Amino acid sequence: MAERPITIAIDGYSSCGKSTIAKAMAAKLGYAYVDSGAMYRAVALYALRNGWADGDTVNGPAIIASLNSIDVHFRPDRATGRADTYLNGENVEDEIRSMAVSSVVSHVSVIREVRAKLRAMQQQMGLRGGVVMDGRDIGTAVFPHAELKIFMTADPEIRAQRRFDELRAQGRDVTFESVRTNLAERDHEDTHRAEDPLRQADDALVLDNSHLTPHGQLALALQWAEQRIGMRNPKMGN
Ligand code: CDP
């Protein structure tokens, strides 16, 4: 009988390496990887383009009224091997990583109707298990029964430096200060909002990767995953 796959939920603060570990785990286990943050970023981009998000103000009613016209999905890119994010048929994978989107996305993600729509899509994607999804509310709201929940954290200065290096390597014109401020503001908003705030699920395992190498953290997370897969697939007759 085929092994029954599990669901892996990875939550945590901005830029603490969730997507790196989630992608590597999915590749190792043969699971699908879903970047839930990309979906919030795509909705934020839609709002920005329509002039509904600007600095600290977001036009919630306009965003809610057009939710049915916002299609977000992932499509694999054969050349790069990554799953790109599409907004109404347009590949927005690069644009959603801009500072312009980063600076409004947390204001858009407080909107209950936005969360309800994206949560339903995410639950659909994970219906059969075999998925590694990262975000802020995956272990608490999207998959509260996930077999493995990981809560990731890292020192804020280290996170800001990592994100700054990543954005500069992509050729983006950002300052360290603007990146650090954006992470701090998003972390605050994400942990203090009323709807499904970022918090550690009671049954989540904490992974502080401030001083772990990518290899070290992956080895640890895979060990946890193998153990949970073993619990879901008890060997018969021995
Ligand atoms: O890349 P980074 O970790 O900085 O952020 P992200 O995962 O791309 O998420 C961008 C933003 O989307 C977060 O700061 C949250 O405001 C929101 N988000 C959310 O509310 N719930 C999720 N499950 C994922 C992201």
Image (cartoon, rainbow, N blue to C red):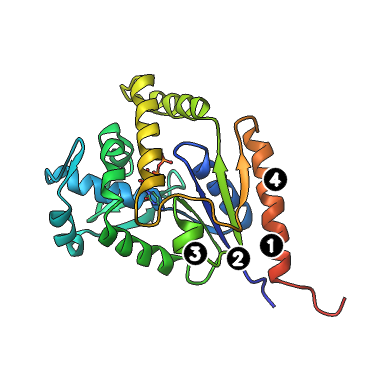
- Element type at marker 3? loop
Badge 2 density bin: few <14, some 14–19, many ≥20, Cα 10 Å: many
Residue of label 1: 228
Could you tell me which residue is drawn at 30 percent across and 21 percent down?
173
Residue of label 3: 143
Q: Are marks 3 and 1 in contact (CB under 8 Å)?
A: no
The amino acid sitting under disc 2 is Ile
Q: Is residue 55 above or below residue 165?
A: below
Q: Measure how far apart labels 2 and 3 are at the Cα level.
A: 11 Å
Q: Are marks 4 and 3 in contact (CB under 8 Å)?
A: no
Q: Is residue 159 above or below residue 139?
A: above
Residue of label 4: 220
Residue of label 2: 6
The amino acid sitting under disc 1 is Arg
Query: Does the Cβ of the disc 2 residue fall within 8 Å of ligand 1?
Result: no
Figure quadrant of the C terminus: bottom right
Q: Position of residue 169 (x, y in %)?
A: 42, 25
- Element type at marker 4? helix
Tell how many labels: 4
Of callouts 3 and 1, which one flags the residue occurring earlier in the amino acid sequence?
A: 3
Query: Does the Cβ of the disc 1 residue fall within 8 Å of ligand 1?
Result: no
Q: Which circle, 2 or 3, is nearer the viewer? A: 3
Q: Measure how far apart labels 3 and 1 are at the Cα level.
A: 15 Å
Could you tell me which residue is drawn at 43 percent across and 67 percent down?
123
Q: Measure how far apart labels 4 and 1 are at the Cα level.
A: 13 Å
